[in-house]
Image (cartoon, rainbow, N blue to C red):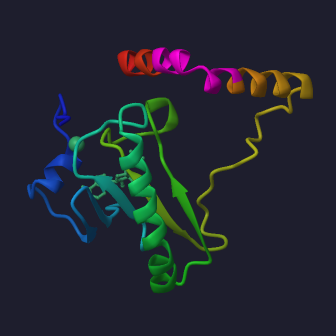
């Protein structure tokens, strides 16, 4: 069982120590309305147990949270007349995470709402195909080597 080493607002909400507008719950996950929504209907899907980011959440639990988000998506879309949806995880400070209790954003979108995750990133260049191929080959090699994967996972946890 993970416990936060600093105060955690989402653990407080899960433990009943703050106002929350819960829209879904099961034995390992809850979902509630984001307090500062991009658009009305913006939901956060959150594990009951405290995990900080993608590097420490168990994969089965992360998959369950995505499953819950996918189930909630058509409901949010219908209730809020959304044109489209974003499913977003910010994992780590450099990736824009502000609350360090892992969560999945389910964001209903309307044309012209002004929110943006600009991809392709305007500041990026298109690398040479040989570089993309080399990256792909490196990934395939890593995925085929369970020992290297275990070491990489351990290094990620240690550096988190
Ligand atoms: P992130 O930047 O991915 O960590 O997103 C954190 C999200 O949590 C933001 O969208 C906040 O609006 C939301 N948030 C922060 N505090 C609360 C709260 N007490 N209740 C509901 N949502 C919250
Ligand atoms: Zn927490």
Question: Taking the image as drawn, is residue 37 in sight?
Answer: no
What residue is shown at x 86% (from left), y 33% (from top)?
126
Which quadrant holds the C terminus? Answer: top left
- Residue 110 in percent (x, y) is at 60, 74
- Looking at the rendering, the quadrant in which ligand 2 lies is top left
What residue is shown at x 48% (from left), y 47% (from top)?
89
Q: Is the magenta stretch mostly helix, strand or loop?
A: helix
Q: Does the magenta stretch include residue 151?
A: yes
The residue furthest right is: 129
- Residue 21 in percent (x, y) is at 24, 70
What residue is shown at x 12% (from left), y 58% (from top)?
18
- Residue 28 in percent (x, y) is at 25, 55
Seen in the picture, residue 142 relative to 55 is either above or below; the reply is above
Seen in the picture, residue 92 relative to 111 is either above or below; the reply is above
Q: In front here: 54 or 122?
A: 54
Left or right of 76 on screen, residue 5:
left
Question: Taking the image as drawn, is residue 104 in sight?
Answer: yes
Which quadrant holds the N terminus? Answer: top left
Left or right of 42 on screen, residue 121:
right
What residue is shown at x 48% (from left), y 39% (from top)?
96
Seen in the picture, residue 76 relative to 67 is either above or below; the reply is below
- Residue 133 in percent (x, y) is at 84, 27
Q: In front here: 114 or 57?
A: 57
Q: Is residue 134 magenta?
A: no
Left or right of 7 on screen, residue 96:
right
Task: Tell me the magenta residue range.
Answer: 141-152
Tally the numbered discs.
Answer: 0
Q: In front here: 126 or 114?
A: 126
Seen in the picture, residue 74 relative to 49 is either above or below; the reply is below
**Picture quadrant of residue 29:** bottom left
């Amino acid at each position: 069982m993970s416990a936060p080493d600093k105060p955690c607002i989402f653990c407080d909400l899960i433990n009943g120590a703050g106002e929350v507008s819960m829209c879904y719950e099961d034995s390992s996950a809850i979902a509630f309305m984001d307090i500062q929504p991009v658009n009305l209907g913006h939901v956060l899907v959150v594990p009951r147990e405290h995990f900080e980011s993608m590097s420490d959440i168990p994969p089965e639990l992360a998959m369950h949270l995505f499953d819950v988000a996918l189930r909630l998506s058509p409901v949010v879309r219908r209730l809020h007349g959304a044109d489209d949806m974003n499913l977003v995880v910010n994992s780590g400070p450099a990736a824009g995470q502000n609350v360090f209790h892992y969560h999945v954003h389910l964001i209903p979108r309307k044309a012209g709402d002004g929110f943006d995750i600009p991809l392709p990133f305007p500041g990026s260049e298109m690398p040479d195909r040989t570089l993309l191929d080399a990256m792909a080959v490196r990934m395939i090699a890593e995925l085929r080597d369970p020992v290297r994967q275990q070491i990489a996972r351990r290094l990620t946890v240690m550096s988190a």
